[in-house]
Image (cartoon, helix red, strand yellow):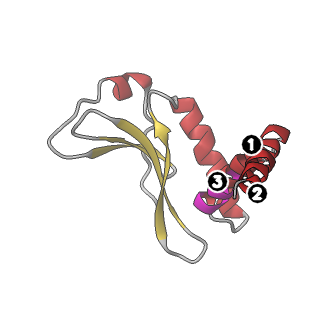
């Protein structure tokens, strides 16, 4: 049975000071805050892939991702795991589709066409 961990508070997170080595502040459900010796605070989630292999997921830096947002991301990752999907791969695929969608604009296609036409004219 997993060990019950009391959830983190904003005060604990703000008062976390860097040490000689990186350390973790557990929030429960696999979510933890990693505090680096340089003073960085990063949200991470430890989980098992559907094939049984252990993996870590980076959810963002504390300054950009609040405690509530990190918990929401943890919950959505757990939902993906429940369906049998790897959240790391699923989120990477979403980011790839977003990048491709941003490149597939009229301006981008027109600039590519223009560049091809210029290259064909030059001897």
Graded by Cα atoms within 10 Å as few (under 14), some (14 to 19) or many (20 or more), the crowding at tag 2 reads few
Q: Which residues are magenta?
A: 88-94
Q: Position of residue 12 (x, y in %)?
A: 35, 27
Q: Which residue is mark 3?
A: 91
Q: Earlier in the sequence, mark 3 or mark 1?
A: 3
Residue at coordinates 42% horizontally, 55% vertically from top-left?
Answer: 3
Q: Earlier in the sequence, mark 3 or mark 2?
A: 3
Q: Which residue is mark 2?
A: 120
Indicate whether residue 90 is drawn in magenta.
yes
What is the distance, in whole Å, between disc 3 and disc 1 at their CAs? 17 Å
Q: Up-down: is 83 above or below 116?
A: below
Q: Up-down: is 112 above or below 14?
A: below
Q: Earlier in the sequence, mark 1 or mark 2?
A: 1
**In the image: residue 90, left or right of residue 45:** right
**In the image: residue 73, left or right of residue 59:** right
Which element type, helix, strand or loop, lies under badge 1? Answer: helix
Position of the C terminus by quadrant: bottom right
Q: Position of residue 90 (x, y in %)?
A: 67, 59
Q: Which residue is mark 1?
A: 102
Q: Position of residue 86 (x, y in %)?
A: 62, 64
Residue at coordinates 62% horizontally, 39% vertically from top-left?
Answer: 72
């Amino acid at each position: 049975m997993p060990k019950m961990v009391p959830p983190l508070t904003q005060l604990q997170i703000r008062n976390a000071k860097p040490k000689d080595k990186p350390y973790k502040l557990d929030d429960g459900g696999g979510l933890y805050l990693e505090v680096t010796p340089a003073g960085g605070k990063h949200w991470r989630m430890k989980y098992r892939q559907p094939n049984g292999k252990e993996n870590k997921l980076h959810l963002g830096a504390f300054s950009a991702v609040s405690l509530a947002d990190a918990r929401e991301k943890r919950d959505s990752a757990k939902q993906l795991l429940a369906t049998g999907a790897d959240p790391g791969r699923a989120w990477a695929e979403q980011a790839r589709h977003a990048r491709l969608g941003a490149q597939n604009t009229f301006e981008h296609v027109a600039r590519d066409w223009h560049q091809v036409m210029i290259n064909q004219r030059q001897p």
